């Protein structure tokens, strides 16, 4: 190929493209996206195996999240299937994990909430959707135990809510209806650009 380029008088040094999966140009964290994908697929599998009256709505919401994560993984050049084949089979978390995850510091200039608390940023790459459950503002999580306090910020409108984990789900943070209303954009059922912090 180089001989043919030289014979044709082509200039400039052509460099091979960097190996896909490093997400160097997009800034996406493939490990975070993979974890979010696995959590959402595991949640969907759980809803299908033990459905209730709200399972259909929850599955539809989660499928929209899965589709978005897959788009972001493709744009970032993440390798493999992100562990999708293992999700729901008890093997989640064994997919495409980076060798070293970057440490991110909390942003000091955050949207207001009840107490202005800041904490450790967690679940980078996760999207946030709603559970369809009623009651006072609360969250469910498959990452943090019941009683953990999380701050969820919608970076698209800078609205935040601080909630306690009240139940278990397949997501890092799944907001109930009341909590989601505090941070949602009108007509949207998921937060694509979210910051999740553990503050207690």
Image (cartoon, helix red, strand yellow):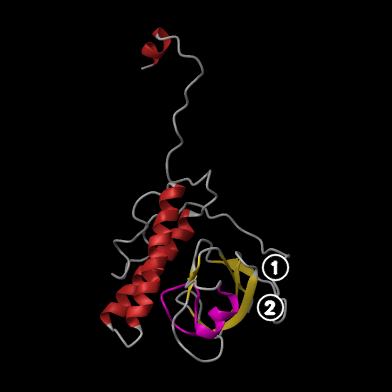
Residue 22 against residue 116 in the figure, above or below: above
Closer to the camera in the image, 141 or 154 = 154
Q: How many residues crowd mark 1 within 10 Å: few (<14), some (14–19), many (20+)?
A: some
Q: Determine if residue 101 is in view.
A: yes
- 162 relative to 29 in the view: left or right: right
The residue that label 1 is drawn on is 110
Q: Which residue is depicted at the point 62% across and 78% down? A: 161
The residue that label 2 is drawn on is 113
User: Which quadrant would residue 10 be assigned to in this image?
Assistant: top left
Dot 2 falls on a residue whose secondary structure is loop
The magenta segment is 166-184
The C terminus, quarter of image:
bottom right
Point out residue 46 in the picture as x, y percentages from the top left corner.
Answer: 32, 78
Dot 1 falls on a residue whose secondary structure is loop
The N terminus, quarter of image:
top left
Are discs 1 and 2 less than 8 Å apart at CB? Answer: yes
User: Which quadrant would residue 184 be assigned to in this image?
Assistant: bottom right
């Amino acid at each position: 190929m180089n001989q043919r380029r030289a014979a044709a008088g082509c200039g400039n040094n052509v460099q091979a493209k960097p190996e896909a999966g490093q997400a160097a140009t997009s800034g996406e964290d493939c490990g975070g996206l993979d974890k979010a994908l696995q959590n959402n697929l595991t949640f969907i599998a759980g809803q299908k195996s033990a459905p209730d009256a709200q399972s259909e709505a929850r599955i539809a919401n989660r499928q929209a999240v899965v589709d978005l994560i897959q788009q972001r993984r493709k744009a970032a050049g993440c390798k493999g299937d992100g562990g999708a084949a293992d999700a729901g089979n008890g093997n989640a978390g064994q997919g495409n994990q980076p060798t070293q995850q970057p440490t991110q510091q909390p942003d000091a200039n955050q949207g207001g909430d009840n107490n202005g608390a800041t904490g450790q940023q967690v679940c980078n790459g996760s999207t946030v959707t709603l559970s369809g459950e009623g009651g006072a503002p609360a969250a469910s999580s498959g990452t943090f135990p019941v009683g953990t306090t999380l701050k969820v910020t919608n970076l698209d409108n800078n609205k935040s809510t601080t909630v306690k984990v009240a139940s278990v789900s397949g997501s890092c943070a799944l907001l109930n209806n009341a909590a989601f209303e505090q941070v949602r954009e009108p007509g949207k059922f998921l937060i694509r650009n979210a910051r999740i912090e553990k503050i207690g």
